[in-house]
Image (spheres, rainbow, N blue to C red):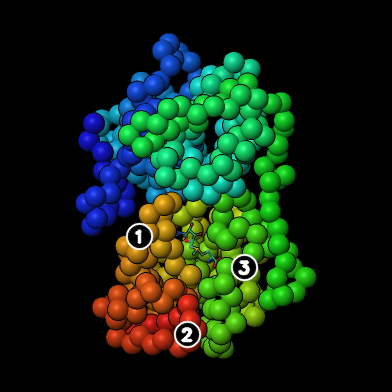
Amino acid sequence: MILKRYPSSKNRSLRPWNAGDEYVLKTLPENLEGKKVLLVGDRFGYLSCHLHHLQPTLVADKRSQVIAISENLKRNELELDGREINPSIFEVGDTFDFAVIIIPKSIELFEFYLSQVSNLLNTDSKVVCPFMTRNFSPRITEVAAKYFEEVSQSLAWKKSRLLQLSNPKSLTTRPEDLIQSFKDDLFGDVKLKQYPGVFSTGSLDIGTRFLLENIELKPDELNILDVGSGNGVISVWLRSQKPEAELCLVDDSYLAVESSKLNLNDSRTTHIWADNLNGLTGIEFDLIVSNPPFHQEYETDVEVSIRLFKQVKKVLKQGGRFVIVANRHLNYGNHLKKLFPTVNVTHQNEKFEIIESSH
Ligand SMILES: C[S@@+](CC[C@H](N)C(=O)[O-])C[C@H]1O[C@@H](n2cnc3c(N)ncnc32)[C@H](O)[C@@H]1O
């Protein structure tokens, strides 16, 4: 198989699969031919490609994952044969004999997957969940035991393990039962809602708070883009300040986009599920705001943000502003200076800085 990461990375040590993925293949039950198989959270498509002969139902929350899986299938001349890559388990209405769930970094997201997958199994179905041993937390087995009678762990192999689950408990957890909500002084009585695993669980991120407490909006900033919008918190605040503005929110995570729709739903707001801004070419924004992503699961990766900054440049109006909040140690100012003629740190504290760029 030829497999590549999407988005590609300059760091050559980053591979498009890990030992956990290989462990799943190595220990695959016999006689899966003709059985219904579910695969949740395949990061770049290693398992989607290797299990292609079983025609698994695929679920991937991130638009970038969907692209990675699709490109790797194509690279290996494998077809989806009319199947879609489902953005969430909500869309899957089938029962499965065998499921693989890649354990995500967010335990809340893992619980969300378990709660939904356990509703889609037969009594004798098996589930395996690979993880790298360094990422183990006792919470993983605790949440698994909420949804399955039998929870065990395999021996370690190449620093990975498999969580093995069987005998699903007959709980029916509806997606809406798992929506979290929180209040914050900046939003008065408004409750912010989000699906599990969406940044930042159960509270306003301190970086985002620093941005919202310090950003001053200009009267003519009426067409605004929120990049990496998460649960939409920045846009909810913008809407409270500028009822007349057109707001566009973009996030790579489907659950994030579904969350922002719970918080902001009006005719002047657009929510886009995308990992890039290519679909916005031709539009010019007066203001672009972001608390940019720099983690992809367990990897710290500023390349994702830098790629987004390059795309921001194409959709920022001449004289418009690109305002970000970021950890000071990330040194985003240096990267932005390579792209924009004017870059200023307008506010900083011991941890964060707000950087304003324009052209
Ligand atoms: C630091 S969080 C900020 C979320 C929200 N704006 C806030 O302040 O709470 C960054 C967000 O960027 C999203 N993200 C990551 N990669 C992305 C990409 N390539 N394109 C768009 N969004 C992305 C993540 O899903 C996450 O919701």
- Queried on whether the Cβ of the residue with tag 3 lies below 8 angstroms from ligand 1, the answer reads yes
* Helix, strand or loop under label 3: loop
Q: Is residue 319 left or right of residue 170?
A: left
Q: Amino acid at mark 2?
A: Gln
> Is residue 120 shown to the viewer in this render?
no
Q: Quadrant of the C terminus?
A: bottom left
- Looking at numbered disc 3 in the image, what kind of residue is underneath it? Leu
Q: Is residue 237 visible?
A: yes
Asked if ligand 1 lies within 8 A of label 1, the reply is no
Tell me which corner region of the image, top left, top right, bottom left or bottom right, holds residue 121.
top right
Q: Amino acid at mark 1?
A: Asp
| Residue 29, numbered label | none
**Relative to residue 95, is residue 163 drawn left or right?**
left
The residue that mark 2 highlights is 348
Residue 221 % position (x, y) = 52, 83
Please report contact status of discs 1 and 3: CB closer than 8 Å, yes or no: no
Question: Residue 18: percent from the left, percent from the top?
Answer: 33, 39
- The circle on residue 204 is 3
Upstream in sequence: badge 1 or badge 3: 3
- Quarter of the rendering containing residue 182: bottom right
Q: Earlier in the sequence, mark 2 or mark 3?
A: 3
Q: Is residue 326 placed above or below 142 in the rendered structure?
A: below
Q: Residue furthest top?
A: 31
- Residue 304: quarter of image: bottom left
Q: Residue at left 65%, top 59%? A: 202
Cα separation between marks 1 and 3: 22 Å
As displayed, is residue 338 above or below residue 56?
below
Q: Position of residue 224 (x, y in %)?
A: 51, 74
Residue 301 badge: 1
Q: Residues within 10 Å of mark 3 (few under 14, many from 20)?
A: some
